[in-house]
Amino acid sequence: MKKTQRKSNTRGFALLGALLAFLCLAAADSRWHLERTGYELTLSRLPEALDGLRIVHLSDLHGARFGRENRQLIELMRQEEPDIVALTGDLAENERQLAAVEELLRGLPEGAAAYYVTGNHEWAGGVAKKVKALMARYGVTCLENSYVSYEKNGARITVAGVEDPNAWAVMKRPKALAEELRRERPEDFVLWLGHRNYWVRRYPALPVDLILSGHAHGGLVRLPGLSGLFNVEHRLGADYEAGLYRSGSYCMEVSRGLGNSVPIPRLFNRPELVSLVLRSG
């Protein structure tokens, strides 16, 4: 009886060890294995002259590096030959992480227009102004509850972006910005950048065409056939945590992000570079 029990205990410890080793490997894969996710979207308001417009979307870097001086991330980004690079916040949460941000900016593809909006961690960590200064140094447009024109092939779209709610107590709200934009440019295709992933829930009728966001880290832990397990408060139950969602006249794409900022490790949830090809409807 004792010998049988000893064998059973040994088998149990072996299985537990194998499970722990598997989870450690999965966590390492979800930290270092950079993945490209591609979407092709047909959008009715996109000008015909901009059919095939390519956007690379990067979010939630949190100071992560992929290869020496972020070369792996930079090469993957350049392979997409983007017209636009969208940086949707939480690139750094403290001064130590600014070097990784600068490495990424140094490698931006030539000829691509790059746009940035802040995330909650830039403000919470007190580095928002320093990240914005880096953006200015490398020719990236900071969208601070504002909008600008992007022009190519004689056609125009509007690129708008909002500061994270962690920014100023008194600032223009998203609805007011969208209404102002539409009064001035009622027919424009609008690409909207906002770090948080709450747009479908809070602003289901926002008069824009495509929203890019991050913030949710893909729900941190992802299981096959299921959505992410954790929401942004790190409690069970995630929504709008990754992928494409539609509401009213717009489509929202939520990036799983590149890094992490919490004790819960990413699991079965590789860091993500999103590539979008836009087609005129």
Image: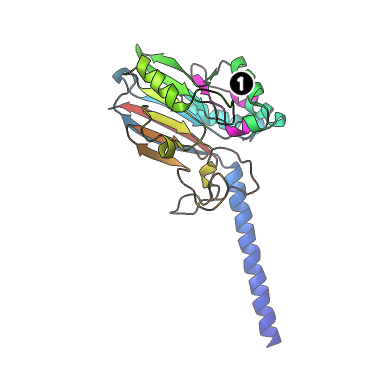
Residue placed at 36% from the left, 20% from the top?
A: 182
Residue 182 inside the magenta-drawn segment: no
Q: Give coordinates of residue 189: x percent, y percent.
A: 35, 22
- For the N terminus, give its image quadrant: bottom right
* Residues packed near mark 1 inside 10 Å, few (<14), some (14 to 19) or many (20 plus): some
Image vertical order of residue 244 relative to residue 184, above or below: below
The answer to whether 273 appears left or right of 16 in the picture is left
Q: Where residue 211 appears, x then y in whole percent?
A: 42, 31
Residue shown at 46%/50% (left/top)?
227
Check the image and name the residue furthest to the front. Answer: 170
Q: Secondary structure at mark 1?
A: helix
In this rendered view, identify the residue nearer to me: 156 or 152. Answer: 156
Image position of 257 with respect to 222: above or below: above
Residue 223 versus residue 160: which sits nearer the camera?
Answer: 160
Report the residue that reaches farthest toward the bottom.
1
Residue kind at label 1, given as amino acid type: Lys
Residue, disc 1? 132
Occupied quadrant, residue 72: top right
Quarter of the image holding residue 183? top left
Report the span colored magenta: 102-122
Q: Measured from the top left, where is residue 147 in percent x and y? A: 46, 18
* Near-viewer residue (235 or 71): 235
Q: Is 165 situated left or right of 103 in this image? A: left
